[in-house]
Amino acid sequence: MNYETRVNTVDTDGDVIVEDIIVEDAPAPPRRRWPWFVLAALLLGAIVAFFMLSGGEEEVPFGAAADEGQTQSVTVISPGAASLEGAINATGTLAARREMPVGVVGEGGRVVSVPVEAGDWVRQGQVLAVIDRSVQNQQAASQRAQIDVAQADADLAQANLDRALQLVERGFISQADIDRLTATRDAANARVQVARAQLGERQARNAQLNIVAPAAGLVLARNVEPGQVVTPGSGTLFSIARGGEMELLAAVGENELAQISTGAIVEVTPAGGDQSFSGQVWQVSPIIDETNRQGTVRVALSYAEGLRPGGFATATIASGSVVAPRLPESAILSDDDGSYVFIVDGDNKVVRRNVTVGAISDEGIAIASGLTGRERVVLRAGGFLREGETVRPVAGQ
């Protein structure tokens, strides 16, 4: 765009000359235009923000309602009651159901060989370790010789007695001599019996030199090597799980312990794997540990390669079907007096209700006692309420 301007100039004679000069306008900078999709996004964001700020009922913070004289609203649910498959989750340690420690029974000695390893299956009476018996064999041979000596003395005493009996009829031998020879013969026979008993003892001791399996089962541990000298004080040399049977020692709280009965089916999952093994409760602890208020549930398991004694495992114990309300974890509170919930009565006042929790599942926590399921239970934020406080209940999902 051009425009005209008037300029006054002075010539060389001092006269003022007025001139009209046409000045060209500088080109205008191009006008910036926003892309359509940016404008659409801004418009959509403004609409969403408007509805978020203006829609719904403004929530009154807990504690602020009482200060401002307002009644605060709380979300409540009526859980009802349903038949639930009781399942108790527990953790514990795997172990041999009947673990047999094996040590030195006899006098011990130097170990010559150990023909088994940990993890081997053995039968009853199978030799686990062989102990040198060279000295003991010589002692047994000596006892056999003592039997022969004693037997020879007994034969001689019998022969002397037989001859004396033939002479007594002729009057050459007195009755006192006969009695003496009879006693000598009896003593010789007794020495034979003593020698035989000593040989039997020696043979029994020699038989105990070898360490054998007291029952068939799985060798869990081997604590002896060839060349080692063992004695009755050497402790456990082998550990055997009789029949290879395993068990889980599950720790269960005293409230849940009462719900478990012998014969209940249990699913056991060892740590570090996803394979589960089925077992059965064969013993429920008759006592409760005073320190942690728990009892032990022993779950019998058949042998499986994935079950290793000493390992950690989780268990799901079937506790039968129960009819009980079920609440989310947010509705249940606890203090020194135990677990409780807040309910809203007919006058919209908050009332504390003590409850006993039961099985825990993905759907919630079963309430074993304390609720019928028809109450209006505060769903969450119960920790900010006071018993006797008036509230405005709002039904939750």
Image (cartoon, helix red, strand yellow):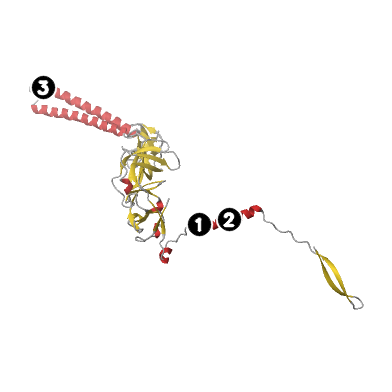
Give whichever of discs 1 and 3 has the lower sequence position. 1
Where is residue 231 drawn, in percent x and y?
33, 40
Q: Amino acid at mark 2?
A: Gly
Can you see residue 103?
no
Q: Residues within 10 Å of mark 1 (few under 14, many from 20)?
A: few
Q: Residues within 10 Å of mark 2 (few under 14, many from 20)?
A: few
Where is residue 131 drawn, in percent x and y?
36, 35
Give whichever of discs 2 and 1 has the lower sequence position. 2
Residue 45 is labelled as: 2
Whole-number angstrom distance, CA of label 3 to CA of label 2:
142 Å
Q: Secondary structure at mark 3?
A: helix
Image depth: mark 1 or mark 3 in front: 1
Location of mark 3 (residue):
167
Where is residue 95 drawn, in percent x and y?
37, 41
Whole-number angstrom distance, CA of label 1 to CA of label 3:
139 Å
Up the image or down, 364 lies above or below 122; here it is below
Quadrant the N terminus occupies: bottom right
Foreground of the two, 146 or 268: 268
**Residue in the image at 41% along x and 57% along y:** 74
In the drawing, does residue 59 fall left or right of residue 254?
Answer: right
